[in-house]
Image: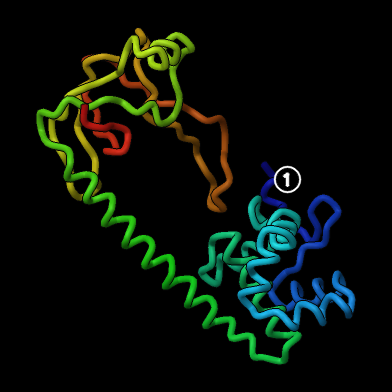
Amino acid sequence: MAQDKARFFSDSINGVYIPKNLEESLKQIDTFWNDSTKQEVAEWTEDELIGKALHGFGTWIRNNWGLWGGSRLSEYFHKMGVHHPDDMSGIILTSYHRKITGKPLEVQAQVQHIKQYWKKAEKEEKELKQKAFKEFSKGDTVEFSYYYEFISSQQEDSYMNDLCEAYGVVINKNKKDLTLLVKLLRACDENGIVVARYSKADNSGMQVGEEHIELMQEGEKKWLDYSLWHVK
């Protein structure tokens, strides 16, 4: 665990130097690309650079500079309000293009654009979830989706061969958090069904300790997210 936390402060991970901020990231790219490459990139538009590099050099940045696993550079972006590694590498690439073409970086404007994008996406996702939630009514028979895993190979075989479906009945609904109170009528296994997986995390979001599963037995009632069920 100490080694995991050290990622957020180290100046290198697996032998690769980790920039501490955007300025250092741009300086590092300067050392990676020769003059002819820089000239070619400068002739592209920003969108062309993102399209051509996001899944090539952008992937290298995300993997090797710890934007997925955590690093001092990812923490720098988190403090700016940018949380997805694709967005982090996008800012780096966009800023580099602007640097070599003599344009202002306008980093805050880039960050604001990303925040607005996610705000809109979250609103649309919420509306879709609310619409899906309305499809459920008290008294509905609902089939379990096995979202997390099967509790046993026998349960999986039964489901895959259409021999047994885990299902329950909707007892109540909570519109605020989009959950259903369901009584499980059939589990297709004496040990029940897996309705959650979880583990503790520290302040940095790193997993602490072993992962645990939550079970639901036949005859039991539980409040669960609506997405675990669909109306039969």
Q: Position of residue 133 (x, y in %)?
A: 21, 44
Q: Position of residue 139 (x, y in %)?
A: 10, 28
Q: Nearer the viewer, residue 107 or 231?
A: 231
2 shown above or below 34: above
Which element carries disc 1, helix, strand or loop?
helix
Three-letter amino acid code at the position of disc 1: Gln
Q: Residue at x 55, y 60 (%)?
A: 84
Whether residue 58 can be seen here:
yes
Q: Is residue 1 left or right of residue 118?
A: right
Q: Which residue is mark 1?
A: 3
Q: Nearer the viewer, residue 166 or 81?
A: 166
Q: Is residue 79 left or right of residue 26?
A: left
Q: Quadrant of residue 157?
A: top left
Whether residue 9 can be seen here:
no
Q: Residue at x 29, y 56 (%)?
A: 126
Q: Is residue 138 left or right of residue 222?
A: left
12 shown above or below 110: above
Q: Quadrant of residue 73?
A: bottom right
Q: Position of residue 81 (x, y in %)?
A: 51, 69
Determine crowd level at label 1: few under 14, some 14-19, many 20+ residues with C-alpha closer than 10 A.
few
